[in-house]
C-alpha cells in the first residue's frame, strides 16, 4: 500500500539556519505529493505541492522537488524564522492508484529559536 | 479567506457515550473528509463523502462511526459508543474536487476528543 516516511523530530534550529526535512514515499501509481504545516493551535494548512516528477513546489521560502528516481520529496528552506516553528507533514495522494485519500507521514516538529 | 470550521474545539465524554463532532465545510466544496490524529501518531484517514454518500472509508471507520450531511452545510461525524482508544484530534476537511494534485484539502482546526 501507499505510505510516507519522514524524518523523526523534533528539529531545533537557530534563526536563519538552513532547514531540511526528509520525506520518502511508497506508492503503487503516480502520486501527487504535498507538504502540510500545522501551527500551534491550528489545523493543517497546505504549504506546497507537486503533481509530477521533477516538479518543484514552493511557498513562503520553502521548496520541495518531486524526485521519482529516489521516491523523495524533501522540504528545504534556506533561512528559517521563529514564525516557521510548527509541525510539518509530508503527504501523498494517489487517485490513479484507486484512492483519493491523503496518506500522511508522522510529522516533524520544528522549533526555531531567536 | 473562507475556512472550514469545527465545533466544539474540545469534547470530553465518558466511555460508551455517543458523540457528534460537527464541521461546516467551505460552501462551494463538494468533497468532505474526516481524519484523526491520536497523540504522537500519524494523521489517519477515516472517511470521504461525496454526493451524499461515503466514497471511501478506512478500516478504522467501523460500525461505531457514521457521517451525515444533514442540511447542506453541516458535515457530522458520529461515534455511537465511544471507547478509550477513540481519544484523538479529529480533523474535518473539504475540497472542491478530488485532491489528487488538482484541488487541495482545506482542514479545520480540529476537535480534541477525550474519552474517560
Image (cartoon, rainbow, N blue to C red):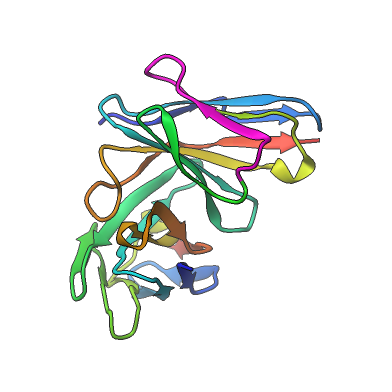
User: Does the magenta segment cover residue B68?
Assistant: yes
Toward the left, the furthest residue is A55
The residue that appears at 45% across and 59% down in the rendered structure is: A103
- Percent across and percent down for residue A71 are 35, 79
Q: Quadrant of residue B52?
A: top left
Camera-side residue: A61 or B54? Answer: B54
Q: Looking at the image, can residue B76 be seen?
A: no
Camera-side residue: B58 or A111? Answer: B58
Q: Against A24, is B34 above or below? A: above
Q: Looking at the image, can residue B93 be seen?
A: yes
The residue that appears at 26% across and 60% down in the rendered structure is: A49
- Percent across and percent down for residue B17 are 77, 26
Camera-side residue: A44 or A113? Answer: A44
The residue that appears at 70% across and 42% down in the rendered structure is: B86
Q: Quadrant of residue A97?
A: bottom left
User: Horizontal placement of A50 versus B34: left or right?
Assistant: left
Q: Which residues are magenta?
A: B61-75
The residue that appears at 34% across and 74% down in the rendered structure is: A74
Amino acid at each position: 500500500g501507499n505510505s510516507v516516511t519522514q524524518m523523526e523530530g523534533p528539529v531545533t534550529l537557530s534563526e536563519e539556519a538552513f532547514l531540511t526535512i526528509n520525506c520518502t514515499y511508497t506508492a503503487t501509481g503516480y502520486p501527487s505529493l504535498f507538504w502540510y504545516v500545522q501551527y500551534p493551535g491550528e489545523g493543517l494548512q497546505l504549504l506546497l505541492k507537486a503533481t509530477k516528477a521533477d516538479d518543484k513546489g514552493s511557498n513562503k521560502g520553502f521548496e520541495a522537488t518531486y524526485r521519482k528516481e529516489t521516491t523523495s520529496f524533501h522540504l528545504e528552506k534556506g533561512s528559517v524564522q521563529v514564525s516557521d516553528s510548527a509541525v510539518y507533514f509530508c503527504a501523498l495522494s494517489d487517485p490513479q492508484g484507486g484512492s483519493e485519500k491523503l496518506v500522511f507521514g508522522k510529522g516533524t516538529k520544528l522549533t526555531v529559536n531567536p | 479567506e473562507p475556512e472550514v470550521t469545527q465545533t466544539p474545539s474540545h469534547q470530553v465524554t465518558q466511555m460508551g457515550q455517543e458523540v457528534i463532532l460537527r464541521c461546516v465545510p467551505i460552501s462551494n466544496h463538494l468533497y468532505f473528509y474526516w481524519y484523526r490524529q491520536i497523540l504522537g501518531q500519524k494523521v489517519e484517514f477515516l472517511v470521504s463523502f461525496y454526493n451524499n454518500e461515503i466514497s471511501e472509508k478506512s478500516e478504522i471507520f467501523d460500525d461505531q462511526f457514521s457521517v451525515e450531511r444533514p442540511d447542506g452545510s453541516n458535515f457530522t461525524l458520529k461515534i455511537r459508543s465511544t471507547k478509550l482508544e477513540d481519544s484523538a484530534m479529529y480533523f474535518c476537511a473539504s475540497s472542491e474536487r478530488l485532491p489528487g494534485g488538482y484541488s487541495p484539502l482545506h482542514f479545520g482546526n480540529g476537535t480534541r476528543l477525550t474519552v474517560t
